[in-house]
Image (tube, grey):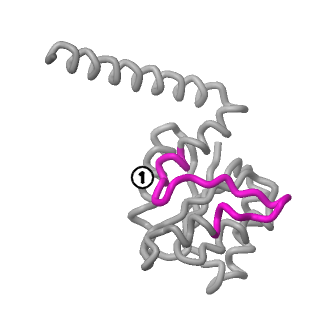
Amino acid sequence: MKVSIIMGSTSDLPKVEPAVGILKDYGVEVSVRCLSAHRAHLGLSKFVEECNQNGTEVIITAAGMAAALPGVVASQTVLPVIGVPLSGSVLDGMDALMSIVQMPPGIPVATVAINGSKNAAYLALQIVGINHPEIKEKLLEERKQMEENAMAANREVMEKF
């Protein structure tokens, strides 16, 4: 099980680290790179080609502002690509969100919320879980725990009133 994460800048690392932790907690091998679509396009293309050949199942991309990275990656692979729009500009991530979500037909990028690397990791796990039952089972267990926690919170509120 392998997921790759590509960010456009080292300043994006704090927003990407939660996804790395979640994936590793599930036993997924994670490759993390900092490869700008604009400033390191040859290195980016080389890494995407490695992903196409080395058993990577999903690529998570995180970028802000013009956020070309997810689309450039998606144009070079048929692996599922998940885009994480990042805040950091005057537009607080809306520019990145609009850039990532508006891909042309045939080159899709699944897009999560601004700074939503945790959900990118969970979406990657759901995709990986299609072929790895142990991941699917662990996700189901975690969802069950979420429900139990929510119901416990509901009981506390009911008892209070």
Q: Where is residue 90 in the image (x, y as percent from the top left)?
A: 42, 79
Q: Is residue 83 positioned above or below 141 on the image?
A: below
Judge left or right: residue 104 versus residue 35: right
Residue 118 part of the magenta segment:
yes
Residue ID at (61%, 66%)? 98
Q: What stretch is highlighted in magenta?
A: 99-121
Find the residue positioned furthest to the left: 160
Horizontal arrangement in the rendering, residue 121 relative to residue 155 (left or right): right
Q: How crowded is mark 1: few (under 14 residues within 10 Å), some or many (20 or more)?
A: some
Q: Residue 48: x and y, percent?
A: 73, 66
Vertically, is 78 above or below 12?
above
Q: Quadrant of the C terminus?
A: top left
Quarter of the rendering containing residue 77: bottom right
Given the image, on which type of amino acid does mark 1 rest? Pro
Q: Where is residue 145 in the image (x, y as percent from the top left)?
A: 40, 22
SS at mark 1? helix
The residue labelled by disc 1 is: 18
Residue 4 is situated, as x and y percent measured from the top left of the image, at 62, 57
Is 13 on the left-hand or right-hand side of 112?
A: left
